[in-house]
Image (cartoon, rainbow, N blue to C red):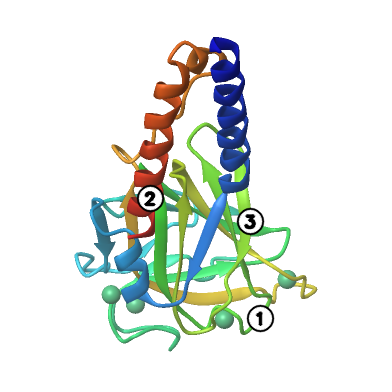
Amino acid sequence: MKRIHLASATAAILALLSLDTQQAKAITIFTSRIDWNTSVSGSDTFVEDFESFTSDTEFRTTPVNVGEFTLLQVGDNPAFRNLIEVSPFQFNDNNGTNHASVYTNFGATKVDLTLNTPVFGWGADFFNANGGEGLNLDLVLDIGGVLDTIPVTVNDGFFGFVINPVEDIRKVTFRSRTNNLGPGGEGFGLDNVTGAISEGRTIPEPASGLGLLAFGALGVGSLLKRKQQYKVRAKV
Ligand SMILES: [Ca+2]
Ligand SMILES: [Ca+2]
Ligand SMILES: [Ca+2]
Ligand SMILES: [Ca+2]
C-alpha cells in the first residue's frame, strides 16, 4: 500500500517537472503600458523620464548613470546620436521632452542599458524604432548569457516584456535587426523607461524530485496547491 502511494507521488512529481518545463522562459510582449503595469502590479517599479537632465549628455564612450540604469554605446560611431537630449532637439523622433536619442548600426554599433537592480519586466516608449534597420532587444541575464532576443514590433509607442516565471534581467541591449549597408542604421527616441524589480519575486522551486519523495503524497498535494496559487498570482 505504501508503495502505491510512493508511485503516485512519483507520477505527480513527474507531472510537476513537465509543467515546469512547459512554463520555462515565458516572455509576454506588451504594446500597452496600461496592460504592462497591470501584469507587474504588486512589484517595485520605476519610470525614468530623463527630465532631471539639464544639458545634452552623450553616452558614446562613457556610461551615463541615469538613476535606475546606465546607458552606454558599444562599438563604432562617428559621433552620431547616443546621447540624452534636452531641448533643442536634433531630431523629431521624440515626444518633445528630454529623452535618450539612440543609434544602432548592424554589426557595428549597439547600446547597452544596464540595470542597477535586475528586472523581470521592462518597457519604454519608442519613437521611430523601425524606420531603418529595425531593432532587436537582447535580454541579458544577471548570471550572464542571453535569455532571448526579441524584435521591437512597434515604430512609435510603448513596447515591453514580462518574464514568467521571474528571471533576473541585468541588461537590455539594443541592436539593429537587419543590415542596411554602410552607416545607415536605426536612430530612435527612447523615453519613460520602466522596469519591474525582480528582487523578492523569485519563486522557489524544489531542489530535486528525490527530496520531495520524503514528504510523501501529502507533501506533493500541498505542493500542487502552492503551485496553483502561484499560477493564479502570476496572472494578475
Ligand atoms: Ca522625457
Ligand atoms: Ca539638445
Ligand atoms: Ca548599417
Ligand atoms: Ca528610426
Position of 154 with respect to 236 (left or right) is right
Say few, some or many: other residues with alpha carbon within 10 Å of mark 2 (under 14 / 14 to 19 / 20 or more).
some
Q: CA distance from mark 2 to mark 1?
A: 25 Å
Residue type of the residue flagged with mark 1: Gly
**Is there any visible trace of residue 204 in the rendered image?**
no
Residue type of the residue flagged with mark 2: Thr
What residue is disc 3 on? 149
N-term mark: 2 or 1: 2
What residue is disc 2 on? 70
The reply to whether the residue tagged 1 has its Cβ within 8 angstroms of ligand 4 is: yes
Residue 142, x across and y down, in percent: 48, 36
Mark 2 and mark 1 residues within 8 Å of each other at the beta carbon: no
- Up the image or down, 145 lies above or below 164; here it is above
Tell us which disc is closer to us: 2 or 3. Answer: 3
The reply to whether the residue tagged 2 has its Cβ within 8 angstroms of ligand 1 is: no
Q: CA distance from mark 1 to mark 3?
A: 19 Å
N-term mark: 1 or 3: 1
Q: Quadrant of the C terminus?
A: bottom left
Q: Which residue lies at the image location 62% right of the left edge and 30% below the top edge? A: 14
Q: CA distance from mark 2 to mark 3?
A: 20 Å
Say few, some or many: other residues with alpha carbon within 10 Å of mark 1 (under 14 / 14 to 19 / 20 or more).
some
Residue type of the residue flagged with mark 3: Thr
Q: Report the front residue among 19 and 100.
A: 19
- Up the image or down, 215 lies above or below 58; here it is above
